[in-house]
Amino acid sequence: MKEINQIIHVTKNIDTLKSILKNGFYTSYAKEKFGDKNILIPMISFSNILFRDIGEDEVVNYGNYGVVFNRDYIIEKFNLNPVFYVKNVSELNDIFLDNFQTSIIPQTLQIAKKFYVDCKCERFSEHIKINPITEEIKSLIDSLDENVNDEFIHSLKIIFENYYINTLKQALLLKPYKVVTKNEETKIAYNEREWRKSFFDLNFIYEIKPDGTKNEEYIQWNKKNKPHYTEKYIQSFDLSDVISIYVNEDAEIIEMEKFITENFNEKIEIYTLQQLKEIENKKISANNYHFSKT
């Protein structure tokens, strides 16, 4: 089996390409749809694909401009991870639900104890306006009273916080096997062979809160122009780290050569995407092998 030893970051226009070369990769929230749930996930995305697959019918088209790196080198430099593609949407929903329910436990334990000390009455879980919430979590919260040791509560909080962080790391790397684009086209996301830079101190953001109301944080971030973070969560690199860059049109090669000369003391290989596709096809033919279409 032949390896695809390149990692590509694809972008939509030449100005963004220039910004990446000069400033590094900025982090933004990307909207993913899991079943009927829209979720914003913070990330920087890369693809481990052939040039010839960019823009193909079954691959989401993110643009005709890109930065090309050696796969193994940039994976280590940026600490990238491959995305987990999940075909069964119900499994995705279960993972996100489990992550969310785990996250509320550390937040409610101390509050629940204080509630029982002050009130000495009804069940605290009945006041949590979250749906769904498992009976097991309700039982845990309702088992607290003034006799429960604070150190025991603290230990429980640490256990569930660690569990939440570990499930969060998995959730931030999930992606549906199939996606529907803005143009209502169904694409096989698996064909992108995505690698992702995740930021585990940034949580994902639900469009709808557990109580069924709109999440204002989701609305605010979704309205903002990308990139969302320009002062932190930046992945920097040197021009010497780059194998090549590509643009959409021949005239843009001259524009990029001028940009490189004005901003760097190095040279870099610049092509159009079509040129890279032709070079790649010649190499594949010369070596008498092919990658099967995905």
Image (tube, rainbow, N blue to C red):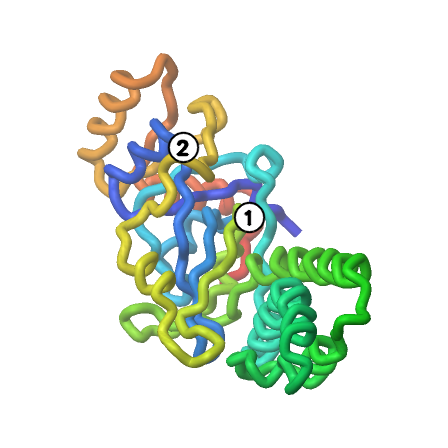
Secondary structure found at label 2: loop
- Farthest residue in the left direction? 251
Label 2 CA crowd tier, 10 Å (few <14, some 14–19, many 20+): some
Circle nearer the N terminus (1, 2): 2
- Viewer-nearest residue: 36 or 261: 36
Which disc number belongs to residue 201? 1
* Residue type at numbered disc 1: Asp
Q: Is residue 58 above or below residue 83?
A: below
Residue 41 in picture, x, y percent from top left: 46, 58
Residue 4 in picture, x, y percent from top left: 56, 46
- Judged by depth in the image, the label closer to the viewer, 1 or 2, is 1
Q: Is residue 147 above or below residue 243?
A: below
- Residue 77 appears left or right of 275: right
- Residue 144 appears left or right of 242: right
- Viewer-nearest residue: 224 or 263: 224
Say which residue appears at 54% left-offset and 35% top-offset. Answer: 70
Residue 1 in picture, x, y percent from top left: 66, 52
User: Label 2: which residue?
Assistant: 24
- Viewer-nearest residue: 4 or 39: 39
* Residue type at numbered disc 2: Gly
Say which residue appears at 58% left-offset and 69% top-offset. Answer: 100
